[in-house]
Amino acid sequence: MLLSVDVMAAEFEYSGEIGIEERYFFEQGQHAEQLEHSQTSFYFEPELYWAWNKGSDSFTFKPFLRVDSQDNERTRGDIRELSYIHARDDWELRVGLRKEFWGVAEFQHLVDVFNQTDGTGDSDAEDKLGQQMLNLSLVKD
């Protein structure tokens, strides 16, 4: 879902993801504390984006909430992104919690050393957590 509204030269966008995940185990666990045959979890990940000052300033907020039927370690909430960006002609400042993605060409993203992997998410290690960041980019000849 995407919603854009122009109010006083500001741009608001709201999008997000909501879903249900189901895991099923065909065999019974070896230990009593292991999960039974199925595990259901619900997740909600909205994203709010706000830009103003003709796009020179922007704010992004992206929380995450998961509720799991069996595993209390997977039931949690966190902030995936909470950042402010100010851009000028020859510099840009980014402050807050963000994900910095490197490794577009790699299958395993070997150079993605900034972001902590979300171990309670999917087993493919693709879900990352936001990290504190202060980034100043300068554009010079």
Image (cartoon, helix red, strand yellow):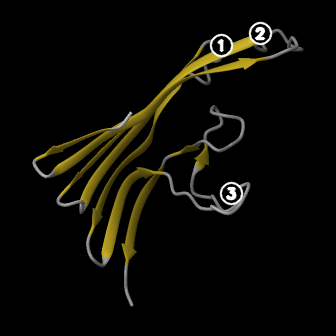
Which numbered dot is residue 109?
3
Q: Is residue 78 left or right of residue 55?
A: right
Q: CA distance from mark 3 to mark 2?
A: 33 Å
Eyeballing the image, is 61 above or below 1? Answer: below
Q: Give the residue displayed 61% in from the left and 12% down from the top.
A: 69
Within 10 Å of disc 2 (Cα), the crowding (few <14, some 14-19, many 20+) is some
Q: CA distance from mark 3 to mark 1?
A: 31 Å
Eyeballing the image, is 96 above or below 3? Answer: below
Q: Label 2 sits on what residue type?
A: Glu
Q: Position of residue 133 (x, y in %)?
A: 43, 57
Q: Which residue is mark 2?
A: 36
Q: Give the residue displayed 39% in from the left and 33% down from the top.
A: 1
Q: CA distance from mark 1 to mark 2?
A: 9 Å
- Answer whether residue 9 is visible to the viewer in this image: yes
Q: Position of residue 61 (x, y in %)?
A: 35, 42
Sequence-wise, the earlier of marks 3 and 1 is 1
Q: Position of residue 121 (x, y in %)?
A: 63, 33
State yes or no: discs 1 and 2 in contact (Cβ < 8 Å).
yes
SS class, disc 2: loop
Q: Give the residue displayed 68% in from the left and 57% down from the top.
A: 109
Q: Label 1 sits on what residue type?
A: Gln
State yes or no: discs 3 and 2 in contact (Cβ < 8 Å).
no
**Number of marks in the rendered image:** 3
